[in-house]
Amino acid sequence: MKTIYRNVSIVLVCAALGACASGPTTFADRVQAEGESKIAIAEQWERGNKAVAKGESRLNKGQKLVSKGRADLLKGEELKSSGTISVQSSRNAYAALAPFPQVADNSAEVEELAVRLEKIAQAWKQGEEELEKGNELLLRGNQRTAEGEAEIAAGQQLIETGRKLMRTAEQSYPVTASQ
């Protein structure tokens, strides 16, 4: 019988303690739960704000890359045009000298012809270098433009995502009459 009383006593004590632990929530419990909820809302808003800032940074970076890419494209086209003109002019100058066998009466005339041919060769080489540099700039310009456009798209996506997070956080925040 003593064991029955002891077991019943233990059960009653456990039940009483359990009732105390899971009893009605106190004001402090409600405030703490509300505080945790508001902290989560604030953290969500802050994540959104950071995403917007990062998105704006990527957007600016992308715009700068696109601008540099366009400048490269413009300079590349100019160099290709200049190089093409130089090469064509050099070809024409060489063609004007080459088909006619020059009969030189002395070494000075041969030297003069050699100097003229050297100038033609230098202009031709410069034209070819301008063409090569122009092509390189066009390639780099296209790459920068593509990379910049990708950065812009990623930045816009981050801004949109961040703003959505911020709006959701703002809509989740309870507004009271005292505010």
Image (spheres, rainbow, N blue to C red):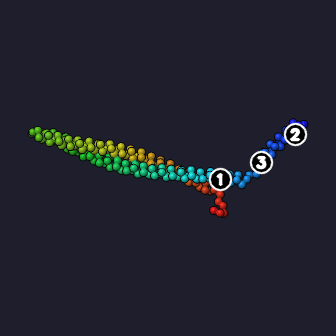
Kindly check if marks 3 and 2 are in contact, taking CB atoms under 8 A apart as contact.
Answer: no
Which x, y percent locates residue 72? 37, 48
Upstream in the sequence, badge 3 or badge 2?
2
Label 3 residue SS? helix
Asked which quadrant contains residue 133, the reply is top left
Number of other residues with Cα within 10 Å of mark 3, as a class: few under 14, some 14 to 19, many 20 or more: few
Kindly check if marks 2 and 1 are in contact, taking CB atoms under 8 A apart as contact.
Answer: no
Residue found farthest to the front? 2
Estimate the spatial distance between the alpha carbons at disc 2 and disc 1, rounded to whole Å.
Answer: 45 Å
- Nearest the camera: 107 or 15? 15
Q: Nearer the viewer, mark 1 or mark 3?
A: 3
Up-down: is 8 above or below 35? above
Which x, y percent locates residue 61? 45, 50
Label 1 residue SS? helix
What amino acid does circle 3 point to? Cys
What amino acid does circle 1 point to? Gly
Estimate the spatial distance between the alpha carbons at disc 3 and disc 2, rounded to whole Å.
Answer: 22 Å
Residue that mark 1 sits on:
35
- Nearest the camera: 4 or 22? 4
Q: Is residue 110 visible?
A: yes
Label 2 residue SS? helix
Direction from residue 34 to residue 17 in the image, left or right: right
Q: Which mark is residue 5?
A: 2
Upstream in the sequence, badge 1 or badge 3?
3
Which x, y percent locates residue 51? 53, 50
Q: Is residue 97 visible?
A: no
- Nearest the camera: 162 or 11? 11
Estimate the spatial distance between the alpha carbons at disc 1 and disc 3, rounded to whole Å.
Answer: 23 Å
Q: Which mark is residue 178?
A: none
Q: Which mark is residue 20?
A: 3
What amino acid does circle 2 point to? Tyr
- Quarter holding the N terminus is top right
